[in-house]
Image: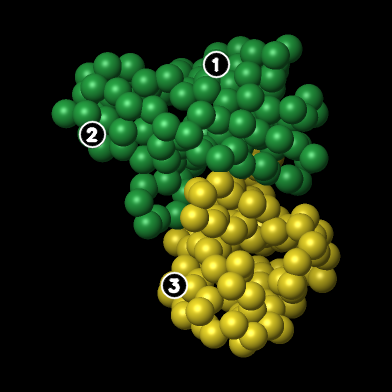
Amino acid sequence: SQTIHQWPATLVQPVGSPLSLECTVEGTSNPNLYWYRQAAGRGLQLLFYSVGIGQISSEVPQNLSASRPQDRQFILSSKKLLLSDSGFYLCAWSVAITGELFFGEGSRLTVL
Amino acid sequence: GEDVEQSLFLSVREGDSSVINCTYTDSSSTYLYWYKQEPGAGLQLLTYIFSNMDMKQDQRLTVLLNKKDKHLSLRIADTQTGDSAIYFCAPRSYQKVTFGTGTKLQVIP
């Protein structure tokens, strides 16, 4: 069966520090991968999605970046965090024809 | 891009039916999903409907789609306290899935 792992679960970082959140999927191949952010207002904002290795589509211009070095690995990064980067980050994958997303448990980032 | 709107809050009594509404803008949406998020947790897929369908029923859940008006609804019959959560409408257009703001459902015992 397919599983998705996302870490770290909780992160507290100072402003200006770097960020790396990692997501891996097991039990499937060539998934579409997604990063969403959920801020305090609850809505989910699509940040990046990827349909294959090295293929990244950015939805929102900001100081975050994403990379997909392997088929089932998706990394969210920042060189210098801002206070506004605080939030709940969710990784997701999809592959079926119906394309539903399956989410990881999320990473809560607090920037101080 | 796609805009998805939902009312922010809904309160119902246990045993009543809940209806959560959603409007979207992208007519090329093919699949439309409903997700549930419990406090502090990730999102769980509840159900979905394909754009060529008007209705889909799955146990206590009924999804209605009015494609002409770009309106989607989720009805939960016999609402229980365990249904308290945030519910997200999420239409899919090609590879992108856009989420609404979420509707927080409060179930009063």
Q: Which residue is mark 1?
A: B64
Tell me the kind of residue under disc 3: Ala
Tell me the kind of residue under disc 2: Thr
Tell me whether circle 1 and circle 3 mark residues in contact (CB < 8 Å). no
Question: In the rendered view of the protein, which quadrant contains the N terminus of chain B?
Answer: top right
Q: CA distance from mark 2 to mark 1?
A: 23 Å
Tell me the kind of residue under disc 1: Leu
Is residue B8 depicted above or below A65 in this figure? above
The picture places residue A49, in percent across and down from the top left corner, at 73, 58
Question: In the rendered view of the protein, which quadrant contains the C terminus of chain B?
Answer: top left
Asked if labels 3 and 2 share a chain, the reply is no
The picture places residue A109, in percent across and down from the top left corner, at 50, 72
Q: CA distance from mark 3 to mark 2?
A: 27 Å
Tell me the tag on residue B81.
2
Q: Chain of mark 1?
A: B
- Shown in green, the chain is B
Residue A51 visible at all:
no
Tell me whether circle 2 and circle 1 mark residues in contact (CB < 8 Å). no
Q: Give the drawing colour for chain A.
A: yellow
Q: CA distance from mark 1 to mark 3?
A: 36 Å
Is residue A93 depicted above or below B99 in this figure? below
Q: Secondary structure at mark 2?
A: helix
Q: Chain of mark 2?
A: B
Front-most of B59 and A41?
Answer: A41
Q: Secondary structure at mark 1?
A: strand
